[in-house]
Image (spheres, rainbow, N blue to C red):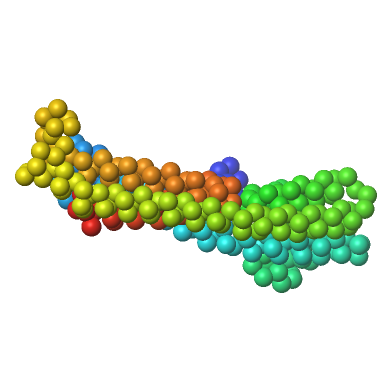
Amino acid sequence: MLENLPKPQFLKNIILTGQVNSFIIKVVTIATASIFVILSILTLAGVLKSFLTTVDFLVLAILSVTGIYGMYSYLNIRKIYKIDTIFPDFVRDLAESRRAGMTFTKAILFASKGNYGILTPEIQKISQQVSWGSSVTDALIAFSERVNTRSIQRTISLIIEASKSGGNVADVLDVAAKDAREIKMLEAERKTNMASYVVVIYVAAFVFLAIIAILCVSFLPSMTGSSTAGLQGTLGGGSVSQEDVLPIFYYASLIQGLGSGLTAGVFEDGNFSSSVKHIFVLVFVSWITFKILLGV
């Protein structure tokens, strides 16, 4: 009768693929963002009275998503970078094990007992999946999906094709290891070259924010003050107060922070996932500037 009970396949897959931390982070991020969105809706409907506006709660939702997930993404990217660097050594050792007469499965199980630094837990996960009945191909594909870099996915594809085709697998593994090293060098060079563009984006964003702040502190009071006609004549006699203009600048700064952060992440390494930390920094600085310094 116990055999008819459903197996916790979802939890098993999460554990086997090493996605436990990622799953927890996603749940916490969605829950936190949902709370702020609900508070925003309640404020808009007039149910909730708070010193924070509807837009403020939406900003907090964005900050919670980009902050929690962004920090996790940043730490994960650093980890993956180190794994990417060590991975060619693992492939080279697989080639040596194959030359020694081991099967592909035994070569991976043997490698899981070695020391590859931060890559060791990932190799042990591959070995664990194989021990639990998964095929070597499925375990390697799951590993490439966890790390999710071009060089490792390319190398894993070469390894899988080599294991299927037979022939001199060791030579193919040596070529794969060399290919992985060259790709890593090219990615590092690209990241170094694009770093200057990321700096330019930050400088432009902060200059834009500084100009907006100066306008709000010095220019707007004189243009909308009670002692001057200010913008009234420009608008055909209509009365415009500083409180009417500040939110426009506020929204413009938030949108500019979102766009600049998104662009900075793409320039950094070509992945949208890298944008979240930049969005958090730029949106947070804009929000703090207007809420604390300008009192919007």
Question: What residue sits 93% from the left and 49% below the top?
Answer: 167
Left or right of residue 19: residue 276 = left
Left or right of residue 185: residue 81 = left
Q: Is residue 266 above or below residue 177?
A: above
Q: Residue furthest left?
A: 227
Q: Residue 165 or 183: which is nearer the viewer?
A: 183
User: How many labels, in total?
Assistant: 0
Q: Is residue 47 above or below residue 71?
A: above
Question: What residue sits 55% from the left and 49% below the top?
Answer: 267
Question: What residue sits 10% from the left and 45% below the top?
Answer: 225
Q: Quadrant of the N terminus?
A: top right
Left or right of residue 177: residue 125 = left
At which x and y percent is residue 50? 17, 49
| Rendering quarter of residue 185 | bottom right
Q: Residue 199 or 280: which is nearer the viewer?
A: 199
| Rendering quarter of residue 250 | top left
Left or right of residue 105: residue 42 = left
Q: Residue 96 or 13: which is nearer the viewer?
A: 96
At which x and y percent is residue 259? 43, 43
| Rendering quarter of residue 255 | top left
Q: Residue furthest top?
A: 236
At which x and y percent is residue 287? 30, 52
Q: Residue 99 or 219: which is nearer the viewer?
A: 219
Determine if residue 242 is in view.
no
Question: What residue sits 71% from the left and 52% below the top?
Answer: 151
Determine if residue 13 is in view.
yes
